[in-house]
Image (tube, rainbow, N blue to C red):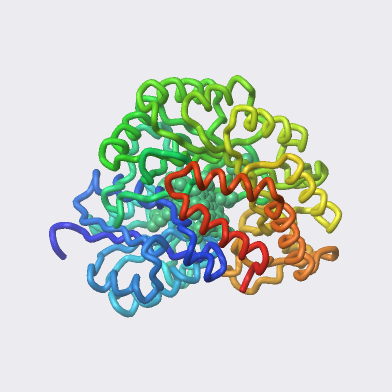
């Protein structure tokens, strides 16, 4: 073994949309979780660390194996999401034959929900927040000591699976080094957002971890335990300053689950952002119930151009069923305020929530048109392992998928209920997209956005693709 322990972190390839659409749409996001792990490990231990982002490179398992065979890592870590667990299992199996001495570590949301499922191919699964736990595993590898004492992992020994005591969440997020963006194959990303910006480069950050809510389709509570931890503003701005300096970005995607969880912090963020980086634009995710007109005004002043909002349903009973803790009235009011401030809205709806039937889904479609966000997505419910939706649907025998790889929001439904067959679900999604997007004002809006933006060719060609998606849907 060389002086440095070689660590390879793998982000799986995920076909977000059906084949031809995925090939055209640039829907690739920075794997922040892996880049956090990488910077934490290399700051603490003598490692040679690389990241292989199969999504960004758009490579298959074979491509990842080739990358791995050339690098010959001592430790391989993979980020495991439900639809891509099969992809990672194939890689792990290959590595077992090719590099039998290599320690194979799985981490991320899927193994946190199902800690024993993959111990036939992985040596260790790391549950929940990864930095400290993975750090201790790397240390035990370097020291040749046993990792069985490390908290927050599952492993197999003598044909039995073990779970070590739960890992505590990191108390102060400011102790974490910034994500190792320099390790990523392409440090500079080009965004496709239809905004008139200085250049097409963007990056992403998270300013907090966790969410205090408990929607029944969301797996976040398993990872972050319904506690929100915030980074300090000084720490956030030090990171932004570095990204702007090194990557010359014009746009920032704030990836927090609910960026507006602490309004006072958001206002301070917006004011400081306006002063330090007046030209930098950004988008964030926000719950409707936290948006006030004062907050939205500050966000606008601070450079916010888009808010992404999980609306989920246009039927209040369905919202109650999902434990969303929000109402259609709250959503409508928030959207009106955003529209008044000329902030774009990306609203996402879930088809197949607990209690959904044809009538409630049609109500959702009518509601989407009534509130009229700038963009809309209609996705089938993914009953993710560990969620209440999964428990309830599997108890009722609704889940029809035989494989985790079918769990894609933009693919086919993985469930059927007494009231919703697969065909009905597919027809209703098509109807939702057609009724929302095939309105003259939406087409006009797209053309204007395309003309305003500097990437008008991309925006228009994406819109044509969207129409193809809307008409033909899955091919
Ligand atoms: C932004 C986001 C996206 C973006 C970008 C993803 C990306 N490149 O990171 C986009 C839009 C592309 C996306 C896509 C999808 N996403 Co998403 N996404 C998120 C979101 C909101 C934030 C991710 C983030 O940056 N978190 C902050 C970082 C610090 O945390 P992290 O990535 O989880 O990483 C930490 C740990 O997970 C762990 N860890 C992660 N990987 C590894 C690997 C190793 C080896 C180790 C040791 C540890 C470890 O350590 C990290 C540091 O603490 C999360 C929700 C959330 N709050 O996490 C959902 C979330 C991760 N997404 C989810 C899902 C379901 C998806 C999709 C599968 C949706 C779909 N069905 O079509 C797709 C495909 C993902 C894939 N690649 O397979 C689920 C995952 C649940 C699951 N069981 O898989 C989440 C948790 C949301 C939810 N509602 O439940 N997503
Ligand atoms: S869906 Fe959003 S608001 Fe609901 S629990 Fe998950 S992160 Fe929180």
Q: Position of residue 277 (x, y in %)?
A: 36, 27
> Residue sitting at 81 percent across and 41 percent down?
316
Q: Nearer the viewer, residue 418 or 75?
A: 418
- Residue 474 in view, yes or no: yes
Q: Is residue 224 above or below residue 121?
A: above
Q: Nearer the viewer, residue 294 or 124?
A: 294
Q: Position of residue 178 (x, y in %)?
A: 32, 40
Q: Nearer the viewer, residue 442 or 256?
A: 442
> Residue sitting at 50 percent across and 25 percent down?
266
Q: Position of residue 440 (x, y in %)?
A: 70, 49
Q: Position of residue 295 (x, y in %)?
A: 58, 23
In the picture, measured across the screen, residue 468 lies left or right of residue 117, that is right
> Residue sitting at 68 percent across and 43 percent down?
311
Q: Is residue 49 above or below residue 118?
A: above
In the picture, measured across the screen, residue 102 lies left or right of residue 360, that is left
Quadrant in the picture for residue 59: bottom left
Q: Residue furthest bottom?
A: 97
Specify the quarter for ligand 2: top right
- Indicate the quadrant containing the N terminus: top left, top right, bottom left or bottom right: bottom left
> Residue sitting at 58 percent across and 68 percent down?
404
- Indicate the quadrant containing the C terminus: top left, top right, bottom left or bottom right: bottom right
In the picture, measured across the screen, residue 21 lies left or right of residue 360, that is left
Task: Give the number of callouts.
Answer: 0
- Residue 166 in view, yes or no: no
């Amino acid at each position: 073994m060389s002086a440095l322990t070689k660590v390879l972190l793998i982000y799986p390839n995920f076909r977000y949309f059906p084949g031809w659409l995925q090939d055209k749409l640039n829907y690739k996001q920075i794997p922040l979780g892996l880049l956090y792990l990488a910077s934490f490990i290399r700051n603490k231990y003598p490692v040679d660390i690389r990241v292989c982002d199969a999504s960004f490179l758009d490579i298959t398992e074979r491509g990842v194996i080739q990358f791995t065979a050339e690098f010959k890592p001592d430790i391989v870590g993979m980020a495991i999401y439900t639809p891509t667990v099969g992809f990672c299992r194939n890689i792990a199996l290959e590595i077992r034959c090719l590099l039998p001495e290599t320690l194979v570590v799985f981490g991320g949301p899927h193994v946190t929900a199902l800690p024993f499922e993959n111990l036939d191919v992985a040596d260790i699964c790391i549950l929940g927040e990864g930095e400290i736990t993975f750090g201790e595993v790397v240390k035990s590898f370097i020291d040749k000591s046993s990792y069985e004492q490390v908290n927050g992992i599952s492993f197999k020994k003598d044909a039995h699976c073990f779970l070590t005591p739960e890992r505590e969440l990191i108390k102060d997020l400011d102790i974490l080094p910034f994500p190792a963006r320099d390790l990523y194959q392409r440090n500079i990303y080009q965004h496709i957002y239809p905004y008139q910006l200085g250049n097409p480069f963007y990056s992403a950050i998270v300013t907090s971890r966790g969410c205090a809510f408990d929607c029944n389709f969301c797996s976040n509570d398993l990872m972050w335990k319904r506690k929100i931890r915030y980074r300090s503003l000084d720490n956030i701005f030090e990171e932004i300053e570095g990204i702007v300096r090194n990557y010359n970005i014009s746009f920032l995607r704030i990836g927090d689950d609910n960026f507006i969880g602490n309004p006072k912090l958001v206002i301070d963020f917006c004011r400081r952002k306006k002063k330090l980086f007046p030209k930098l634009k950004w988008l964030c995710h926000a719950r409707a119930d936290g948006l006030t007109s004062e907050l939205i005004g500050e966000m606008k002043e601070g450079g916010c151009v888009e808010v992404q909002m999980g609306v989920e349903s246009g039927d209040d009973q369905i919202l109650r069923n999902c434990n969303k803790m929000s109402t259609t009235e709250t959503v409508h009011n928030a959207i009106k305020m955003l529209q008044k401030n000329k902030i774009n809205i990306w609203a996402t709806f879930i088809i197949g929530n607990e209690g959904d039937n044809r009538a409630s889904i049609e109500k959702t479609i009518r509601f989407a048109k009534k509130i009229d966000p700038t963009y809309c997505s209609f996705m089938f419910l993914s009953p993710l392992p560990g969620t209440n939706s999964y428990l309830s649907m599997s108890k009722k025998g609704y889940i029809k998928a035989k494989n985790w790889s079918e769990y894609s929001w933009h693919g086919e439904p993985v469930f059927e209920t007494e009231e919703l067959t697969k065909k009905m679900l597919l027809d209703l999604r098509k109807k939702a997209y057609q009724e929302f997007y095939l309105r003259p004002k939406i087409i006009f809006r797209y053309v204007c956005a395309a003309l305003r933006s500097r990437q008008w060719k991309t925006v228009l060609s994406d819109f044509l693709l969207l129409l193809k998606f809307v008409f033909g849907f899955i091919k």
